[in-house]
Image (tube, rainbow, N blue to C red):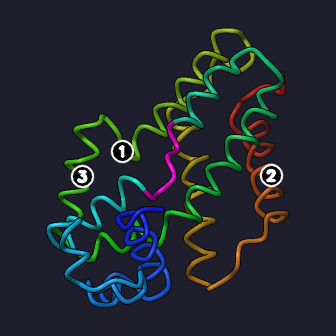
Amino acid sequence: MGTRDTILDAAMHVMRTRGLNNATTKEIARAAGFSEATLYKHFEDKEDLFVELLRGRVPPFLPVMKALIGRVGRDTVRENLAEMLRAAVDFYLDSFPVFAATFAEPRLLARHREALAQGNLGPHRAVEGLAEYLRKEQALGRVAAEADPAAVAAMLLGACFQYAFLAHFAGREPDPADATAYSESIADSALRALGLTAG
């Protein structure tokens, strides 16, 4: 692993365990086993380091949505939703501390927002992707015609985000079995309450 990657891994560890305010360049360099001078050879400043951290160390969710679109008409809507929602729970559990910390630094949040916009990325893309999947299933008659795909997508992903928020707020270690049961439960709730079919 190169020096730059080691620094980014250390920054992620420090941010997750000590928070953004305590993630100083000095502390990150110490955790990485380098001097601050080495850190500044690879990054302009702390802001630059964290923009790169957000870009490269938070696992992307877009591939999950693309895979979901590829499953239109295959398996059941329930199976497809449950699998995607489980991935969403994992994504939010993993990324929540990092994203939440960016809101403490308005300039960092603005730079992150700009970087996402340049790549046509951002949290809205997950909702759009899920809504697209539901619309395509709707066209096949596997989702009820009266269902609102955008509203359903927002509610389902919002439930996943809420799960991650509450887990972090409570200081609870993620339980894979519980996360799976939760994902399946909200998929089943969508089928029953939101006019989706089980097909």
Q: Which residue is mark 3?
A: 113
Crowd band around label 1 with a 10 angstrom C-alpha radius: few (<14), some (14–19), many (20+): some
Alpha-carbon span between mark 2 and mark 3: 33 Å
The amino acid marked with disc number 1 is Gly
**Residue 185 got which mark?**
2
Magenta stretch in the rendered image: 57-62
Q: Nearer the viewer, residue 188 or 173?
A: 173
Estimate the x, y position of residue 170 in percent, counting from the top left: 62, 85
Q: Is residue 65 above or below residue 168?
A: above
Crowd band around label 3 with a 10 angstrom C-alpha radius: few (<14), some (14–19), many (20+): some
Quadrant of the image for the C terminus?
A: top right
Mark 2 near mark 3, Cβ–Cβ under 8 Å?
Answer: no
Horizontal arrangement in the rendering, residue 14 relative to residue 105 (left or right): right
The amino acid marked with disc number 3 is Arg
**Residue in the picture at 35% in, 53% down:** 55
Give whichever of discs 2 and 3 has the lower sequence position. Answer: 3
Residue 73 in magenta stretch:
no
> Which element is circle 2 on?
helix
Q: Nearer the viewer, residue 168 or 59?
A: 59
Mark 1 near mark 3, Cβ–Cβ under 8 Å?
Answer: yes
